[in-house]
Amino acid sequence: MRLLRYLASPSALHPTFFFAISIQTALLEVFLKKVEIILGPTGVGKTDFAVERALECGSPVISCDSRQIFREMTIGTAVPDASQLAAVKHYFIHSNSVTEDYTAGRYEIEARSLVNELFAQGHETLVMCGGSGFYVDAFVNGLDDFPPADPALRSELSARLREEGVGELARRLRELDPESCGVIDLSNGQRVVRALEVCLMTGRKFSSFKTSPSRRHDFEIEKIGLVRPKEELYSRIDARVLRMIDSGLVEEARSLLPFRNRPALQTVGYKEIFAWFDFLDGKVSTEGWGPTSPGDGPVTTLDRAVELIQRNSRRYAKRQMSYWRRDDTIKWVGNI
């Protein structure tokens, strides 16, 4: 009744009244807009969950997977299958080539532009899905400016990578920046080199450049984390690797040999098969290597390559969960 009497009074026509109404309307629009980010470890079932959720709310699926973005990589990146792509519009799936340098910073800009465009089209809830921690952080928090590469230091670290292997560089990175080790794929030599380079150049942790806590949003963000019991998750990972082999992962990897040194190909599933190819081509030998030798040794059979892909995928899933457990804004679905 008070509101009705006020609306009927001359004071209701005061400019401050319309200003207050416009502010309330803007706030209401903000609270009606939401991005749901479906995240979790590799192999947990994010794609199925995201497609189902997208169908429920009439949303496309915005991928935040740093490997599914490359069109030449299909089997080894477990992109959504044909039926899922047909059921729901997907963005950032096979949108770029492995010959391009695609970064989390570029993803932040393009994903934010897309989200704003989709909200302008009338969407109230948007579904984002992926397991790449840097991409999620870039979208949610933004990225600080990373220092440019130091050619001399990069050359030195790359030489050490070739001579000592990624394990030794990862050990050094763990000493300097344990937080980054929770999200970086430590079997990816290029990423380890870059993180270590930044630490040594600046005296700061690589992880300190990742996020800017002052990032503001004009929409709500809800993180939904999927999790399964460890034994179940590891079993799913092992089975998925076998399905990838049956679906033609070896042939896909062979087609990508000309690009094997590109950053996109420094990832689990491809580098193990590349190592097997190197043995078949006589580029590596078992001479001088034994059970007590450091590292995994030459990959002499496809079975050994598969075993390493399964093991490295399980290790990656474990690091992903260690990283995300520190985020108390995630709403977990499943048993954690």
Image: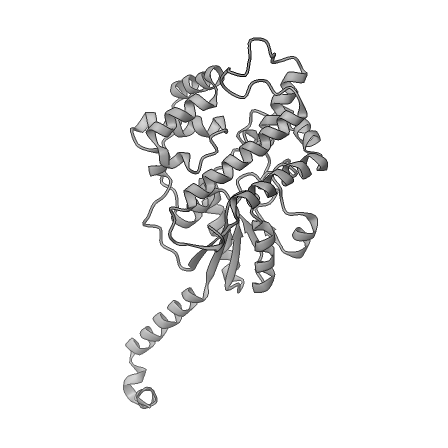
Which residue is at a point 31% across and 84% down the rendered structure image?
A: 12
Does 185 sit left or right of 286 as displayed?
A: left
In this view, the residue farthest toward the top is: 288
The quarter in which the N terminus is drawn is: bottom left
Image height check: is 139 above or below 57? Answer: above
Q: In which quarter of the view is residue 274 placed?
A: top right
Q: Position of residue 21 (x, y in %)?
A: 35, 75
Q: Position of residue 84 (x, y in %)?
A: 66, 52
Number of numbered callouts drawn: 0
Q: Nearer the viewer, residue 73 or 115?
A: 73
Image height check: is 315 above or below 303? Answer: below
Q: Is residue 27 visible?
A: yes
Which residue is at a point 31% across and 83% down the rendered structure image?
A: 13
Does 128 sit left or right of 72 as displayed?
A: left
Image height check: is 84 above or below 236? Answer: below
Q: Position of residue 19 (x, y in %)?
A: 32, 73
Q: Is residue 102 visible?
A: no
Q: Position of residue 313 (x, y in %)?
A: 55, 35
Q: In which quarter of the view is residue 329 placed?
A: bottom left
Rendering colour mode: one colour
Which residue is at a point 66% across and 56% down the rendered structure image?
A: 87
Q: Nearer the viewer, residue 73 or 320?
A: 320
Q: Nearer the viewer, residue 95 or 303?
A: 303
Which residue is at a point 58% across and 28% down the rendered structure image?
A: 308
